[in-house]
C-alpha cells in the first residue's frame, strides 16, 4: 500500500522543534506531506511555544507551499463547541458537526479568507477531530472546497459531490493491501517512540508525497461504504476509550 503523510494542527505556537524533527525525517526521503493549517487558532491545547509575529508564521507557511507541501484548511478556530461526531465519529466533539449550515458557512468562509489574505489557496479541508456533517459538506462546496482528508478505504472516493482521501484505520493491518492510505501525525504530542515508528515506516514502506495521492483516480462510494465507514469509526473510538481506561 502507498502511504501519504498528513500533519495536523499547524499553528503559530505549535512545537516547532518536534515539527522540524518530523519534517527532517520526511525531507531526507523527498516526501512532501499535507499540512493542516489552523487559520485563527483559539485552542490553547495547541500552544506549545511563545507566539511569533504574525507574518513570521505566514512566511513559514508560504515557504512550505513552495517546497511542494500540500496545504489544507484545518477548521477555523480549532475549538470544539458541540458534542457531535457527525458522519465520521472517531470523536464525539466538533467545531462543525451539529451546528447549522449558516454557522458552519460563516466559520469556513472566515478561515478560507484568512488563508487567502496570506496568499494561500487550497481545495482541501481537514476537519478538526475528524468530525463533520452534511451541513459541513454543503458549506465547503459553497466556498469552493471539494476535497476532504478523512474517511476509511484503500483509495480516494467520491460522495456527496466531494472527493475524500482516506486515512489509516489500522496501518499495520493495511501494509500488504493494494491502494492508498494516509498516516496522520500530530507532531505536538509525538514522543520518542513515535519518531522511531515514523523512521521505520518511511524506511521500509512505500511512502509518497501527498501530491501523488491527489492524482489517484477516485471511486464512487455508495451508502454501503458510508455505513461501513461509520461503523469502523465508531468501533475505533470505543476501542481507544477502552484502552485509555485500562492504562489509567
Image (cartoon, rainbow, N blue to C red):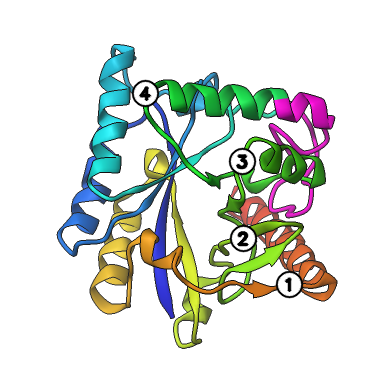
Element under disc 2:
strand
First reached walking from the N terminus: tag 3 or tag 1: 3
Residue 139 lies, in percent from the top left, at 73, 37
Label pair 1/2, CB-CB below 8 angstroms: yes
Q: Distance between the residues labelled 3 and 1?
A: 21 Å
The question of residue 83 being in magenta is answered with yes
First reached walking from the N terminus: tag 2 or tag 3: 3
Element under disc 4:
loop
Residue sitting nearer the eye, 121 or 50:
121
Nearer mark to the viewer, of 3 and 1: 3
Label pair 4/2, CB-CB below 8 angstroms: no
**Disc number for residue 144:** 3
- Residue under the point 32% across and 24% down: 58
The question of residue 101 being in magenta is answered with yes
Q: Main secondary structure of the magenta part?
A: loop
Element under disc 3:
loop
Q: How far apart are marks 4 and 2 (CA)?
A: 27 Å
**Disc number for residue 221:** 1
In the rendered view, would you say 57 is above or below 199? above
In the rendered view, would you say 164 is above or below 24? below
State which region is magenta: 81-105
Q: Distance between the residues labelled 2 and 3?
A: 15 Å
Residue 126 lies, in percent from the top left, at 56, 45
Amino acid at each position: 500500500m502507498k502511504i501519504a503523510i498528513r500533519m495536523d494542527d499547524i499553528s503559530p505556537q505549535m512545537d516547532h522543534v518536534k515539527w522540524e524533527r518530523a519534517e527532517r525525517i520526511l525531507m531526507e526521503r523527498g516526501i512532501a506531506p499535507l499540512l493542516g493549517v489552523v487559520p485563527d487558532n483559539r485552542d490553547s491545547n495547541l500552544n506549545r511555544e511563545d507566539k511569533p509575529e504574525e507574518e513570521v508564521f505566514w512566511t513559514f507557511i508560504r515557504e512550505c507551499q513552495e517546497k511542494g507541501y500540500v496545504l489544507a484548511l484545518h477548521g477555523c478556530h480549532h475549538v470544539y463547541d458541540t458534542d457531535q461526531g457527525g458522519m465520521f465519529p472517531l470523536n464525539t466533539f466538533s467545531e462543525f458537526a451539529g451546528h447549522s449550515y449558516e454557522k458552519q458557512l460563516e466559520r469556513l468562509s472566515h478561515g478560507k479568507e484568512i488563508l487567502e489574505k496570506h496568499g494561500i489557496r487550497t481545495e482541501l479541508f481537514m476537519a478538526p477531530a475528524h468530525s463533520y456533517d452534511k451541513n459541513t459538506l454543503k458549506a465547503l462546496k459553497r466556498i469552493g472546497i471539494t476535497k476532504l482528508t478523512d474517511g476509511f478505504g484503500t483509495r480516494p472516493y467520491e460522495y456527496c459531490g466531494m472527493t475524500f482521501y482516506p486515512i489509516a484505520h489500522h496501518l499495520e493491518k493495511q501494509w500488504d493491501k493494494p491502494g492508498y492510505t494516509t498516516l496522520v501525525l500530530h507532531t505536538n504530542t509525538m514522543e520518542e517512540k513515535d519518531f522511531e515508528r515514523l523512521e521505520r515506516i518511511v524506511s521500509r514502506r512505500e511512502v509518497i508525497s501527498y501530491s501523488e495521492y491527489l492524482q489517484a483516480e477516485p471511486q464512487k462510494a455508495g451508502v454501503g461504504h458510508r455505513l461501513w465507514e461509520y461503523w469502523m469509526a465508531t468501533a475505533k473510538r470505543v476501542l481507544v476509550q477502552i484502552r485509555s481506561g485500562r492504562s489509567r
